[in-house]
Image (spheres, rainbow, N blue to C red):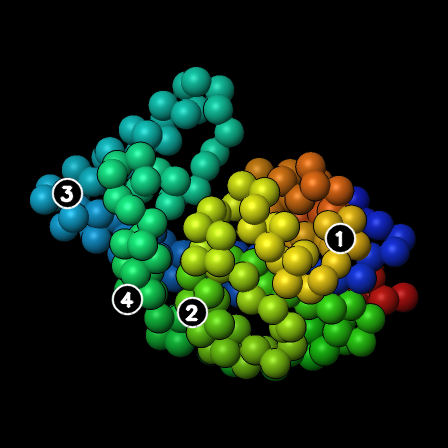
Amino acid sequence: MIVRALPADAEALIFDFDGTLYTNAAYARYQEDSQVARLARHLGIAEAEAAARLEAAREARRAAGLPKTSLARHFLSFGVDMASIVRWRIEEIRPAEWIGPNPALDRTLAALARRFRLALLTNNPREVGRAGVDALGVASRFEAVIGLDDTFESKPAPEPFLAAALALGLPPGACVSIGDRVDVDLEPALALGMGAILVDGVEDVYRLPELLTR
């Protein structure tokens, strides 16, 4: 765990979901694979070709020295509209098939909620985010869930972070973004004046009460 910034007057914690509140590499792979399969059907090409086009787009950004962008932004560049991106994810991604109740996480979030307001910020649609925290048995701990269909932008764009702060009725500077990716979860939040904490999966999340509530 790495604390990049922690405002002394922080009032809220904004959590990423995938790779942060659970650790399941197979589920993470499935999410992308399922969407690449939908892209292939949409474009009328083989899944292998769709995957190759996605990797080529990512490599082009790396070669140009550009920062990473989201899967949704890549799909937009392939001519897929945002409404379809949202619908495909709702139709294909079912968290309860991959993750289950986590009492240790629930206790952790309960401890954090005694001091902070909690929100979830996911690059998946809000319905998928809610299904995810419900599958983990922690839905009641989150005051707000912000998803792709709230702003039609995905992290690392600033709009989702601002939407999460707005949903809590707080300025960005009163919020701390917690996630597993520096370029997606931390750097955009820091640019908005938020705090930022890098975690390496849910095991690091368990340690947050000791860090933040002492």
Q: How far apart are marks 2 and 1 (CA)?
A: 25 Å
Q: Which amino acid does label 1 sit on?
A: Pro
Mark closest to the chain's N terminus, 3 or 2: 3
Q: Residue at coordinates 65% horizontally, 77% vertically from top-left?
A: 141
Q: Mark 3 points at which residue?
A: 43
* Secondary structure beneath label 2: helix
Which of 27 and 173 lies nearest the eye of the viewer? 173
Q: Mark 4 points at which residue?
A: 91
Look at 11% across and 42% down and name the residue there. Answer: 45
Give the image location of residue 15, x and y in percent.
Answer: 62, 60
From the top left corner, tell me how far across and down residue 186 is, in percent: 65, 44
Q: Which of marks 1 and 3 is in front?
A: 1
Visible residue check, residue 206: no
Mark 4 neighbour density, 10 Å: few (under 14) some (14–19) many (20 or more) = few
Image location (x, y in percent) of residue 132: 47, 71
State the CA–CA distance, disc 1 to disc 3: 42 Å
Number of the front mark, 2 or 1: 1
Q: Do the residues labelled 4 and 2 touch (CB within 8 Å)?
A: no
170 on left or right of 157: right
Percent across and percent down for residue 77 are: 31, 35
Which numbered marker is on residue 127?
A: 2
Amino acid on which disc 2 is placed: Glu
- Above or below 48: residue 92: below
Marked residue nearer the N-terminal end (4 or 2): 4
Do the residues under discs 3 and 4 have CB atoms within 8 angstroms? no
Measuring 75% from the left and 74% from the top, which residue is drawn there?
Answer: 113
Comes first in the chain, label 1 or label 4: 4
Amino acid carrying label 4: it is Glu
Q: Mark 1 points at which residue?
A: 171
Q: How far apart are marks 1 and 4 (CA)?
A: 34 Å
**2 or 1: tag closer to the N-terminus:** 2
Disc nearer the start of the sequence (1/3):
3
